[in-house]
Every structure is written in structure tokens, then in C-alpha cells.
């Protein structure tokens, strides 16, 4: 009873500790902004329940906080909280938002600091001789190109209550170079029912990077804006186009209700459309000079590479899973696959690569691609997997850069004596040796001999004995001459019937094992492919058929170790291939 209570309290403590796992994180909607823009700072708390206190913000000398929003979601008793703070910058330069602290059940948690860059953005106004006011836009030269272009376009629409603009971070990118596309809808009056239509693109790949909100003062008028960000990548050199984005909207706070329409309410305003201007890009080809063989199409900077092998201590003939992962800006799906170099002492079976994208801490899309292969050591020893090289083009430096992995040491022990690739003796219930099933003691017993019958007396006639002996010899000779062809013929018929029902590579291998064991009338489990080929040639099989058999065996190995490799025969095709080769062996073998 005491042990049961102890176990109950241990489980209760473990459950409580799982539910008490609190996570605290913080991020901003943009890492670069101008003085007349705003910043959204979001703090997320998960793994809490019941009443919680507000997080404590650090000192913010570079910002004024003018709005706060709280969003709460509770699922299975666990509460997730989002605290959004809208802040306005106060001065130009780098600003750091220090750690946010949060206290829950006596424990204090804190976030990592966040750094943003604030740029100057101002206008000068002058009065002309005609009395008109002329506005000169002065943009901070250090402002990122995308924000600078969006700001210029916004000032060009000064005075309009609604407008839509778009811009890119670079109009002359290289092939496969990721650039940013920003689309902003500005408004200074209320509106409703405003569906958004994203732009169409040609010769470009476009990935969604999320949306944000902000405000901007333009010539004395405060505008709110909604921004949608994309990452675009050119597919080939030449011209690429980004069509206009669109927003359809109605002026006013909301659409009229049925009650308003019946009892004299004013009619709803007409639908209007705001369109952005189309953008044309001039895509530059990648330079051929200095391009290394390890370049597979990636363009950007700050890439990373890592390789691992599992396991690193095996026997000869066992599989080692090797993977190489690269990470960096942009989408790596369109890049070519890494080519694994040949390595003495190993058979290499490349597998299909996997790729994907995720949003980084700075809001930019981060891509990754994982290249996989199966390395099968042939002989024992200590090996070192080489440094795998992967190159990319740096558009800032206009040069190719090469990354390489660290070498990996592999220890290979000798293969087990019964391990020789496919076990061609797996279908033999007795294996390769002799198995004693049971033993008993034969006792000598005494008894009276029976009286001779007619057959016993007849056996004493010499001529009768000679006739029986001749008949037995002829029978043994007939059986010896006819049994072997019959057994061999039966082996093929059995294999043929089984191959028609085979649905996996392992089943095909087992059927071939049993067939060759019956045809060659010897164990084949410990034979290598080379030894088996020699044995087939000695049995009369032609070199062409032996080569076909060797290719089939290699296909079976490839399906075993790397079933997703391009060009490898599927499990549906292998039974028919195996049957065709066994027919040739059946016809040619002596």
C-alpha cells in the first residue's frame, strides 16, 4: 500500500511539473523603422493557468508606448497570453529593448533583448514666388532601400485619403537572389469591406512573409497603413514583372443595416479600388568566372552547413545514414541536390533531399535543405568521411563562397560470418550446416527366430538373388539420372509462382535465394556477388545473363538501403525483372 501511494505522489509531481512549464518570448514586427513610424512589440506567455500578472517592461528611453492590447486563449486548462505594445520611436540610432520579466508562482522568467534600427525621415517645406508650398522629401541615406522607396511613394500620394503602393528591395537582382516586396495600403479616413488582391508575377517565385500595421505622418496628416511582405526570387535572367496589387473598399465606418435602409438611412457609398503600380525587374545572370563545381544555385549570404552520420560504429555491410543540412536566407527548394563524392571502401546510395522554409527572428524567410545518402562499408577498418563542400554566390561581394563540413570518423568492424549481403540460404530451414534434431538409445532384445517361410526359402536360390540385384541397380541408376533435372525444374516452377505474388524487395530476394540454392545445390548465404557470378559462369550461364543478374542484385540492394533514390526500380517492377533473368539462367545452366 505504501509503495502505491508513493507511486501516486510521484506521478502527481511529474504531472504538475509538466503543466508548470512556462515559456516567455518577445519579438517586434520590424527591425528597421523611421522616426514617423510605429513599432509593435509582442510578448507571448504560454503554459500558465488561473490569474496571472502583467509582464514587466524594461526601461524604454528610445520609445513612447501609447497603446496596449491583451489577447488570451485557454485550451485544456492552459492559458496563452499575447501582450502587444504599440510604440513610437523618439530618436535616431540603434535602440535596444531590454529583457521583459514575468513572475508566475514565485518563479521569474525573462526574454532575450531585441535590437532595432531607427532612421531619420523628414521633409523641408519652402514657399515659392507664387505663394505655393513646395515639399522636398529628405530620406535618411542609411534607410534600407525598401523602406526608402515606400516612403518616397507615400509622400508622392500626400493628400489622398486612400492609396496603395508597392516596392522591392532591389530592381536588378541576380538569378535565385531573394529580394523583398512590400505592399502598403494607406488610409486617413474610415472604411469597410476591403478585400485585398495580391499581385501576379512572371519569371518569379513568391513566398508570403506575413503582414504588419503602422502609422506615418505625411505633411501634417497621420495615416494608418497595412503592409503585406513577400519574398520573391527570379527563376531565370532577363525581365521579370510584378503586377499591380489591389484593394476594393467602401468609405465609412460600416455598411448600412437593413433597419437603416427601411427607415430612411443614407445609401452606402460606392465601391472604390486602389491599385499599386506594376514593377519591372532586370534579372542578372550569375557570373561563369570562378564558379566552383560545388555550386548548386544558392544566392545570398550568411549560409551555414552541418553534416552528421548515424551510427558511426558499424559492421561491414551495415548501413550508415549520412545527412548534410544547409540553412540560409531565401527559399532553397529550387537549388540542385548536393553530389556525394565517391569514397573507397563504401557503396553510396543517395536519397531524395528535403527542403522547407521558416520565418527567422528578423522576420525574413530562412530556408533549409537536407541532403541524405546511405553509406554501406564493404570492408572493415577506420575511415574518415570527407569534408562535403557546398558553394553559394554572394551578391554583395559579387563572388562565390564555399562552405565545407567537418570530417567524420567511421569505425567498421568485420562482418559476421553468416552475413554476406542478402542471405541466399534464408529459405533453408536447416541453414548451411547439419542440425541434429533428437537422439535415442537402441536396446538389444533377444527373441526366438521365426520359422522360414516360402519367400525366405526362395531367397536361398542364387539365380533369384542375382535378378533382384540387377533390378535394384537399374532402378537406382534411373532415379539418379532423373531426380536432378526434376528437382531443378521444380525449383524454377516454384520460383515463378512465388514471384507472381511477391510485393516487396525482400520477398524477391528470398525467392532468388531459394532458387539458386536448389539449382546450385550448395549454400550461398556466405558468397559475395563476385563469387556468385563465378559460380554461375562455371554452371554454363553466359556472361550477359550473369551481368543482368548482378544488376538485379544491385537494384535490390539499392531498394533495401535507399528506397527513394531516383532511377531505382520499384518493388512492382523487380518481380518481373527477376522472373526474366531466372528464365535465362534456367535455359543456360548445365
Image (cartoon, rainbow, N blue to C red):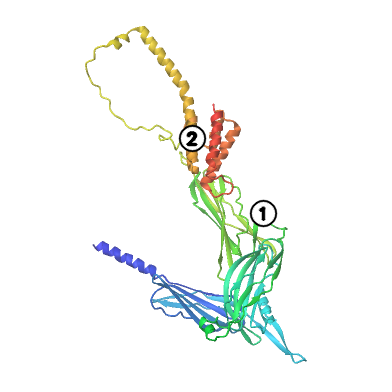
Going by the picture, which residue comes out furthest to the front? 262
The disc placed on residue 495 is 2
Residue 252 or 539: which is nearer the viewer? Answer: 252
Viewer-proximal residue, 162 or 52?
162
Residue appearing at x 49%, y 51% in the figure: 311
C-alpha span from label 1 to label 2:
47 Å
- Taking the image as shown, residue 452 lies to the left or right of residue 472, namely left
Residue 27 in percent (x, y) is at 53, 74
In this rendering, position of residue 151 left or right of residue 590: right
Q: Quadrant of the N terminus?
A: bottom left
Q: Is residue 147 above or below residue 352?
A: below
Q: Position of residue 142 (x, y in %)?
A: 67, 77
Please tell me which residue lies in front, 291 or 154.
Answer: 154
Binning the other alpha carbons within 10 Å of mark 1 as few (below 14), some (14 to 19) or many (20 upward) gives few
Instruction: State the SS at label 1.
Output: loop
Position of the C terminus by quadrant: top right
Seen as rendered, the residue at the extreme right is 129
The residue pinned by badge 1 equals: 293
Question: Mark 1, mark 2: which one is toward the viewer?
Answer: 2
Res. 17 image quadrant: bottom left
Horizontal and vertical percent position of residue 224: 59, 81
Amino acid at each position: 500500500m505504501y509503495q502505491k501511494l508513493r507511486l501516486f505522489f510521484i506521478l502527481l509531481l511529474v504531472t504538475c511539473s509538466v503543466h508548470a512549464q512556462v515559456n516567455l518570448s518577445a519579438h517586434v514586427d520590424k527591425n528597421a523603422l523611421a522616426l514617423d513610424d510605429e513599432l509593435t512589440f509582442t510578448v507571448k506567455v504560454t503554459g500558465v493557468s488561473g490569474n496571472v500578472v502583467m509582464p514587466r517592461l524594461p526601461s524604454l528611453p528610445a520609445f513612447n508606448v501609447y497603446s496596449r492590447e491583451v489577447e488570451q486563449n485557454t485550451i485544456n486548462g492552459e492559458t496563452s497570453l499575447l501582450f502587444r505594445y504599440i510604440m513610437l520611436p523618439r530618436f535616431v540610432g540603434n535602440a535596444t529593448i531590454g529583457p521583459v520579466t514575468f513572475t508566475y508562482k514565485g518563479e521569474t522568467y525573462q526574454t532575450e533583448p531585441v535590437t532595432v534600427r531607427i532612421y531619420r525621415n523628414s521633409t523641408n517645406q519652402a514657399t515659392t514666388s507664387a505663394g505655393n508650398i513646395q515639399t522636398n522629401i529628405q530620406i535618411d541615406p542609411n534607410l534600407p532601400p525598401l523602406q526608402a522607396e515606400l516612403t518616397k511613394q507615400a509622400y508622392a500620394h500626400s493628400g489622398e485619403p486612400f492609396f496603395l503602393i508597392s516596392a522591392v528591395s532591389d530592381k536588378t537582382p541576380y538569378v535565385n537572389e531573394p529580394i523583398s516586396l512590400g505592399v502598403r495600403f494607406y488610409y486617413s479616413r474610415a472604411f469597410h469591406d476591403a478585400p485585398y488582391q495580391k499581385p501576379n508575377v512572371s519569371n518569379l517565385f513568391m513566398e508570403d512573409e506575413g503582414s504588419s500595421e503602422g502609422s506615418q505622418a505625411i505633411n501634417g496628416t497621420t495615416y494608418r497603413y497595412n503592409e503585406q511582405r513577400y519574398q520573391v526570387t527570379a527563376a531565370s535572367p532577363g525581365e521579370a514583372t510584378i503586377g499591380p496589387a489591389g484593394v476594393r473598399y467602401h468609405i465609412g465606418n460600416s455598411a448600412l443595416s437593413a433597419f437603416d435602409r427601411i427607415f430612411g438611412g443614407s445609401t452606402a457609398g460606392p465601391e472604390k479600388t486602389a491599385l499599386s503600380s506594376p514593377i519591372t525587374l532586370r534579372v542578372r545572370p550569375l557570373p561563369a568566372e570562378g564558379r566552383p563545381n560545388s555550386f548548386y544555385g544558392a544566392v545570398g549570404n550568411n549560409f551555414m552547413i552541418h553534416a552528421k552520420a548515424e551510427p558511426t560504429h558499424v559492421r561491414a555491410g551495415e548501413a550508415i545514414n549520412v545527412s548534410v543540412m544547409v540553412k540560409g536566407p531565401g527559399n532553397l527548394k529550387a537549388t540542385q541536390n548536393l553530389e556525394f563524392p565517391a569514397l573507397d571502401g563504401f557503396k553510396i546510395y543517395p536519397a531524395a533531399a528535403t527542403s522547407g522554409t521558416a520565418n527567422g527572428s528578423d522576420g525574413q524567410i530562412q530556408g533549409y535543405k537536407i541532403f541524405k545518402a546511405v553509406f554501406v562499408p564493404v570492408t572493415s577498418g577506420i575511415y574518415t568521411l570527407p569534408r562535403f563542400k557546398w558553394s553559394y554566390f554572394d551578391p554583395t561581394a559579387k563572388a562565390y563562397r564555399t562552405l565545407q563540413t567537418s570530417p567524420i570518423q567511421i569505425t567498421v568492424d568485420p562482418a559476421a560470418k553468416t552475413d554476406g549481403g542478402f542471405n541466399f540460404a534464408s529459405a533453408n530451414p536447416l541453414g548451411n550446416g547439419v542440425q541434429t534434431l533428437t537422439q535415442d538409445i537402441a536396446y538389444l532384445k533377444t527373441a526366438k527366430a521365426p520359422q522360414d517361410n516360402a519367400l525366405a526359402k526362395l531367397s536361398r536360390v542364387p539365380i533369384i538373388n542375382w535378378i533382384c540385384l540387377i533390378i535394384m541397380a537399374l532402378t537406382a541408376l534411373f532415379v539418379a539420372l532423373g531426380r536432378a533435372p526434376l528437382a531443378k525444374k521444380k525449383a524454377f516452377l516454384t520460383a515463378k509462382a512465388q514471384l507472381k505474388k511477391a510485393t516487396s524487395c525482400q520477398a524477391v530476394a528470398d525467392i532468388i535465394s531459394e532458387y539458386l540454392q536448389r539449382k546450385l545445390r550448395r549454400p550461398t548465404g556466405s558468397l559475395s556477388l563476385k563469387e556468385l557470378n563465378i559460380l554461375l559462369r562455371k554452371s554454363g550461364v553466359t556472361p550477359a545473363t550473369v551481368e543482368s543478374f548482378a544488376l538485379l542484385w544491385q537494384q535490390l540492394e539499392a531498394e533495401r538501403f535507399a528506397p527513394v533514390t531516383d532511377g531505382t526500380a520499384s518493388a512492382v517492377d523487380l518481380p518481373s525483372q527477376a522472373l526474366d533473368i531466372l528464365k535465362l539462367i534456367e535455359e543456360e545452366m548445365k
